[in-house]
Amino acid sequence: MSTEVFAQLQAKANEAEAIGGTLKFVIDDLIVFVDGSGNSNIVSQEDNEADCTITTSAATLLELQSGDLNPMMAVMGGKIKIGGDMGLAMKVQSLLG
């Protein structure tokens, strides 16, 4: 499951415009670090400090990707925790779509 989630995020990040900062996803026990501070998004599994950290579960991520869960409701319901730059968090939709 975790390699599948990583591969999906990596593929989406490679297609999307650079996000203009660094973003770390903590999905269950998986770390996905997106460095979009340059001309493109570079995805790794390094546990680096990020401008924005998003913590959630793989199950919640799947619900978001399928459209069964509204991102705002997930945050308000505590299924997603966001720390740091909220502007960067708003760009996450392009990485999940």
Image: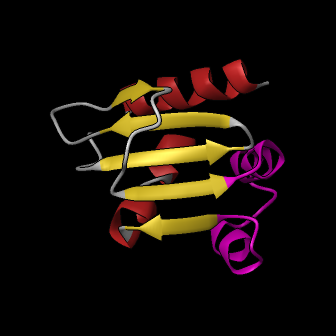
Q: Can you say which quadrant of the picture contains the N terminus?
A: top right
- Is residue 85 shown left or right of residue 93? left
- Is residue 10 shown left or right of residue 65? left
* Magenta span of residues: 56-80
Query: Residue sitting at 72 percent across and 26 percent down?
Result: 2
Query: Residue 70 location, x and y as percent?
Result: 71, 67
Query: Residue 48 location, x and y as percent?
Result: 39, 40
Q: Is residue 31 magenta?
A: no
Query: Residue sitting at 72 percent across and 69 percent down?
Result: 74
Quarter of the image where one finds residue 68: bottom right
**Residue lying furthest bottom:** 76
Figure check: 45 above or below 33: above
Query: Residue sitting at 76 percent across and 66 percent down?
Result: 79
Query: Residue sitting at 49 percent across and 42 percent down?
Result: 95
Query: Residue 13 location, x and y as percent?
Result: 42, 32
- The one nearer the camera, 72 or 82, is 82
- Is residue 89 shown left or right of residue 2? left
